Image (cartoon, rainbow, N blue to C red):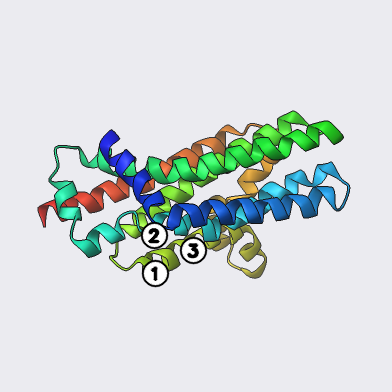
Amino acid sequence: MLAIYKREMRAFFSGPVGYVFVAIFFAVSAGIFMSLTVQKGDSANYQNYFTYVIMLCIIEIPLLTMKLVSEERKMKTDQLIVTAPVSLFGIVMAKFLAAYTLFGGSFLVSSIIYYIPLKAYGTPESATYIGSVIAVLLIGAAFVAIGEFISSLTENQFLAAFGTVAVLALLIFAQNINTYVNSEFLRRIFSAISVTSRFTYFMYGLFDWASFIYFLSLSALFIFLTVRVFERRRWS
């Protein structure tokens, strides 16, 4: 598992993907942070910053996950991996952790950097800031797991990216879709899967166990589904 994790991390930075991800993330997140806090002169706007970071994930997460498995399938190297003396769960987790390390590391570094001027020149509420950071990390884990699963379904990286974008957009904007839906059944479904509505609890410094379990369950579900895809290919 560790060997595959190291291999995936090297793969990110042996090509442009890792550098492009980090560059885009820091450039866009810095621009959002500056426009919401510094230019408006209101440090409280950092709460909206985290909301925009979640929306940024619609583009950034697929960039990380589109090659995780689809490239292996295209190059036919996935057969070598599934026959290696490593459990399928270990393979899937190694790939998941590699992508999540890049996302989580970039996000945590930026969050620490942005908190310093907030603390120096404003009065940010630590509970709301930390709560928002935890929520984005949980959401990021779920999104990476979803991206890895979709990547395992096709050898076309663009299809994997497009599919991930579509699913993440649905989860993020599910609450907004509710305003255009008349069916009570569908409204309940969209409310249940909504990411932004659950993020709100953390944004106000409240640790919501239901939302915490939801994000972890979402991550676990798609990791399990990815393992099943690998298992099917092993015996096909």
Q: Amino acid at mark 1?
A: Phe
Q: Amino acid at mark 3?
A: Val
Residue at x 61% of width, y 57% of height: 55
Q: Amino acid at mark 2?
A: Met
Q: Which mark is residue 95?
A: none
Element type where label 3 sits in the image: helix
Assess disc 1: are there few (<14), some (14-19) or many (≥20) residues with their C-alpha within 10 Å of its C-alpha: some
Pick the quarter of the image with the C terminus: bottom left
Q: Which mark is residue 165?
A: 3
Q: Quadrant of residue 106?
A: top right
Element type where label 2 sits in the image: loop
Which residue in the protein does label 2 denote?
A: 66
Report, in whole angstroms, how far the alpha carbon at label 3 lies from the one at label 2: 10 Å
Of mark 1 and mark 3, the one earlier in the sequence is 1
Element type where label 1 sits in the image: helix
- Residue 117 is left or right of residue 131, and the answer is right
Labels 3 & 2 near each other (Cβ < 8 A): no
Q: Using the image as rendered, state which of residue 41 and residue 168 is in the foreground.
A: 41
Pick the quarter of the image with the N terminus: top left
Report, in whole angstroms, how far the alpha carbon at label 1 lies from the one at label 2: 7 Å
Which residue in the protein does label 1 denote?
A: 158
Q: Is residue 132 visible?
A: no
